[in-house]
Amino acid sequence: MKDKVVVVTGAGNGIGKATALLLARLGAKVVVNDLGSSGNGEGQAAGPANQVVGEIVAAGGQAVADTHSVATREGAASIIQTAVDRFGRIDGVVNNAGILRDRIFHKMNEDEWRAVIDVHLHGSYFVSRAAAPFFKDQESGVMVHMTSTSGLIGNFGQANYAAAKLGMTALSKSIALDMARFNVRSNCIAPFAWSRLIGTLPSETEAEKQRLARMQSMKPEQVAAVAAFLISDDSAEINGQVLAVRGNEVMVMSQPRPLVSVHSATGWDQESLRTHALPAIKRAFTPLERSPEVFSWDPV
């Protein structure tokens, strides 16, 4: 990790901050990017990024603050340029910046939809795209994208967030396929950890309170350890994967593949689909579950 230059977006708090601090301790030069907005994306302040940089420098590391928005092409290009101007190169990107604007689907408005898509999905694209030419020319580079089980599995009131996060996994896989020839890797992490965004989730029912209690036991530093490993050369054989990090557990998440198939030599109609196809394939249907129902055990 020594002397690698890594951009971490959304690094003013939570997982991003823990990742930036760990990368710096391991010898990386870190661009601490944070817009300084609230959890729903409103406002802007330099304080969070500057505070993390101050902690890194005080501990003997090297870092520079950046407050550009990931949600525009120009902002993302400026983030990567900050790394190149300050440290002379770019070796890794951790796409961690995010906001939440939860709303049950039939009440979600266009602004809530677009704001979340812009930061998570467009932001990951813009930052990755800005770094890609540098990675291609130097024939090395790593991207780590923070996805979510809200997209991989599902959750209530998060259609915008889930769509963005699942889109990020497809983006990561496409980057891995397109850029493997240039020795560039791209992977996703689905993190479980307490953060200010998690703190905005409702905690009214007993089940919700228990879920938040479990989340509070899982630390950003546990996710940061895996993110730093994926940036390092030690993970050279990992590409195009989705890892879930839940406390001290690290899981490889499945990616869509055919489960069962059914064939009709004469084609299908409504009757044959109902009487033949449906009974044959329904055993492979994915249950309509949410993330808390799939991950129902206490974290290790």
Image (cartoon, rainbow, N blue to C red):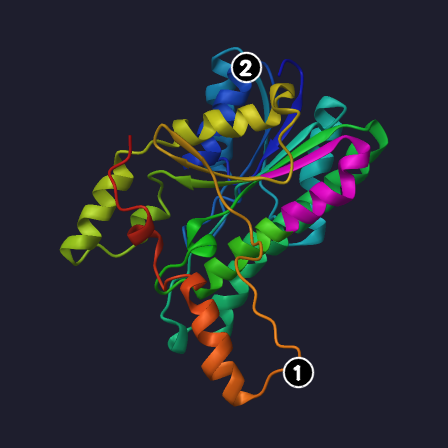
Label 1 or label 2, whichever lies nearer to me, is 1
Q: Position of residue 215 (x, y in %)?
A: 28, 41
Amino acid type, mark 1: Thr
Question: Going 77% across and 30% down the picture, which residue do you hit?
Answer: 183
Residue where numbered disc 2 is placed: 26
Q: Quadrant of residue 79?
A: top right
Query: As rendered, which of 216 and 30 lies closer to the eye?
Result: 216
Compared with 75, 268 (above or below) is: below
Question: Going 62% across and 16% down the picture, which residue do you hit?
Answer: 1
Is residue 225 rendered magenta in the image?
A: no
Question: Going 75% across and 26% down the picture, which residue do you hit?
Answer: 89
Q: Element under label 1?
A: loop
Residue where numbered disc 1 is placed: 266
Name the outermost residue toward the front.
265
Tell me the magenta residue range: 171-187
Is residue 171 visible from the viewing direction of this image? yes
